[in-house]
Image (cartoon, rainbow, N blue to C red):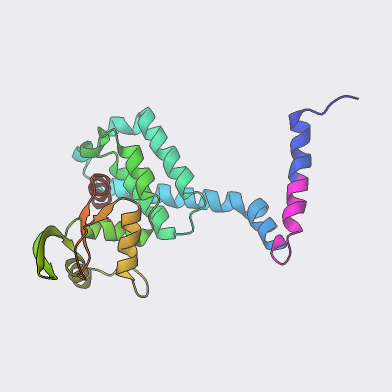
């Protein structure tokens, strides 16, 4: 009996997979439609949104600050591919546009020679729109030297304090919906190594410093107007 080759087997496996998904209780039909009928549409829509945001951002830049040669480089191709992969099934519409604008920022002369840009884009792609904007805000808050006391001991730290971040947010443009849980968002940023919490003794307000990758990521975000 002649064995089937891979191309002949693929349709059979796809049929089996769709049948398996459809058989999932309660949600099978919806998942089947999403995975096999809507996936390509969602992917193309998101990539189109990211490319449009990239184009809009480039038009905002003065020609003198753009490294036009970079946009025809292999690194640019890798950057665009990374953007496409990260936005393909991203449900956060604003984040999709953010990543497009950040890729545009990669073509500025001050970033085009940076060998770390792919790592920075990958790093920012883990954050939500709100977290990217918050990181940008944090990077503009000046370090403050404060002292905390506990049990007859005193500790001095130079850091970005939560109260200063909060004041900056209150005086700036609102970029989040509903209520932002600032403490939780700061913890998320710390978990992704964009900021690092300063260990303080006793009960005190939280204090942070930007990490090296966090500082670089914030610079790209600010260049992109975020």
How many numbered dots are placed on residues in this image?
A: 0
Which residue is at the front of the view, 145 or 33? 145
Furthest-top residue in this view: 2
Q: Position of residue 39 (x, y in %)?
A: 60, 51
Foreground pick, 86 / 100 = 86
Residue beneath the point at 38% across and 28% down: 74
Q: Residue at x 48, y 52 (%)?
A: 46
Could one spot residue 215 in this view of the protein? yes
Q: Position of residue 138 (x, y in %)?
A: 22, 59
Specify the quadrant of the image occupied by residue 163: bottom left
Residue 120 lies in the magenta stretch: no
Q: Is residue 107 above or below residue 158?
A: above
Q: Is residue 86 left or right of residue 221?
A: right
Q: Is residue 225 visible?
A: no
Q: Quadrant of the C terminus?
A: bottom left
Identify the residue at horizontal 28%, vertical 44% (top origin): 105
What segment carries the magenta color? Answer: 15-28
Q: Is residue 154 left or right of residue 109?
A: left
User: Is 154 situated left or right of 98 in this image?
Assistant: left
- Please check the rendered image and state whether residue 25 is part of the magenta-colored stretch, yes or no: yes
206 with respect to 32 (left or right): left
Horizontal and vertical percent for residue 57?
A: 31, 49
Q: Quadrant of the N terminus?
A: top right
Image-quadrant location for residue 187: bottom left
- Residue 55: give x, y in percent of width and height: 35, 47
């Amino acid at each position: 009996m002649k064995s089937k080759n891979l191309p002949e087997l693929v349709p059979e496996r796809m049929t089996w997979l769709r049948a398996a998904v459809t058989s999932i209780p309660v949600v099978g039909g919806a998942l089947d439609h999403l995975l096999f009928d809507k996936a390509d549409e969602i992917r193309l829509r998101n990539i189109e949104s990211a490319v449009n945001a990239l184009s809009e951002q480039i038009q905002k830049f003065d020609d003198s600050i753009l490294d036009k040669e970079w946009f025809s480089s292999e690194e640019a191709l890798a950057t665009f591919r990374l953007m496409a992969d990260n936005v393909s099934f991203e449900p956060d519409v604003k984040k999709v546009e953010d990543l497009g604008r950040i890729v545009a920022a990669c073509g500025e002369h001050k970033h085009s020679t940076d060998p770390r840009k792919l790592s920075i884009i990958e790093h920012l792609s883990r954050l939500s729109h709100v977290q990217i904007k918050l990181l940008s805000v944090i990077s503009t808050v000046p370090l403050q030297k404060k002292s905390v006391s506990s049990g007859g001991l005193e500790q001095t730290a130079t850091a970005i304090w939560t109260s200063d971040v909060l004041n900056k947010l209150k005086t700036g443009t609102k970029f989040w919906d509903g209520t932002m849980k600032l403490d939780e968002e700061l913890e998320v940023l710390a978990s992704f190594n964009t900021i690092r919490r300063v260990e303080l003794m006793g009960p005190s307000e939280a204090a942070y410093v930007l990490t090296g990758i966090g500082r670089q990521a914030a610079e790209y975000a600010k260049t992109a107007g975020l």
